[in-house]
Amino acid sequence: MTIRNWGPVRECMRTEVTLDDGSIDVLTALKVMKKNKVTSLIVKRRDENDEHGMVLFSDVAKQVIAKNRAPERVNVY
């Protein structure tokens, strides 16, 4: 097994995260991802009893697009 030295994580990770509202639909989330050139979004809490969430492009592909669901009718929360 070969061990590679990839360097420090800070050189390949982003320092800023993209936050979005929990009430948006998947289509809007995809537009935000494209605009910010990211493949994931942090979803803000809708109220104090809610939890933060995360939307990944791969989740959208598996759970929305592959199931032939309309992205503009599916919420991210």
Image (cartoon, grey):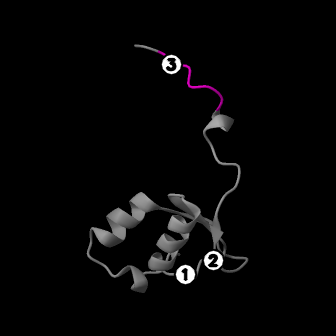
Q: Nearer the viewer, mark 2 or mark 3?
A: 3
Q: How many tags in the picture?
A: 3
Sort mark 1 into few (<14), some (14-19) or many (20+) by Cα contacts within 10 Å: some
Residue at left offset 31%, top offset 70%: 65
Q: Which residue is mark 1?
A: 24
Is 20 on the left-hand or right-hand side of 63? right
Q: Position of residue 7 (x, y in %)?
A: 62, 25
**Residue at coordinates 33% horizontally, 63% vertically from top-left?**
62
Q: Residue furthest bottom?
A: 73
Asked which secondary structure carries label 3, the reply is loop
Disc 2 and disc 1: Cα gap in Å? 6 Å
Instruction: Indicate the quadrant containing the N terminus: top left, top right, bottom left or bottom right.
Output: top left
Mark found first going from the N terminus, 3 or 1: 3
Q: Nearer the viewer, residue 34 or 42?
A: 34
**How much space separates mark 3 and mark 1, taking CA atoms?**
41 Å
Image vertical order of residue 29 relative to residue 62, above or below: below
**Which residue has dot 3 on it?**
4
Q: Nearer the viewer, residue 14 or 63?
A: 14
The amino acid type, in three-letter code, at marker 3 is Arg
Residue plotted at (68% across, 37% down): 10
The magenta stretch is 3-8
Residue 35 within the magenta-colored segment of the rendering:
no
The alpha-carbon separation of the residues under discs 2 and 3 comes to 39 Å
Mark 2, residue position: 21
Three-letter amino acid code of the residue under disc 2: Asp
Question: Closest to the observer: 50 or 40?
Answer: 40
**5 magenta-colored:** yes
- Please identify the residue farthest to the right as the structure is shown: 48
The x and y percentages for residue 45 are 66, 74
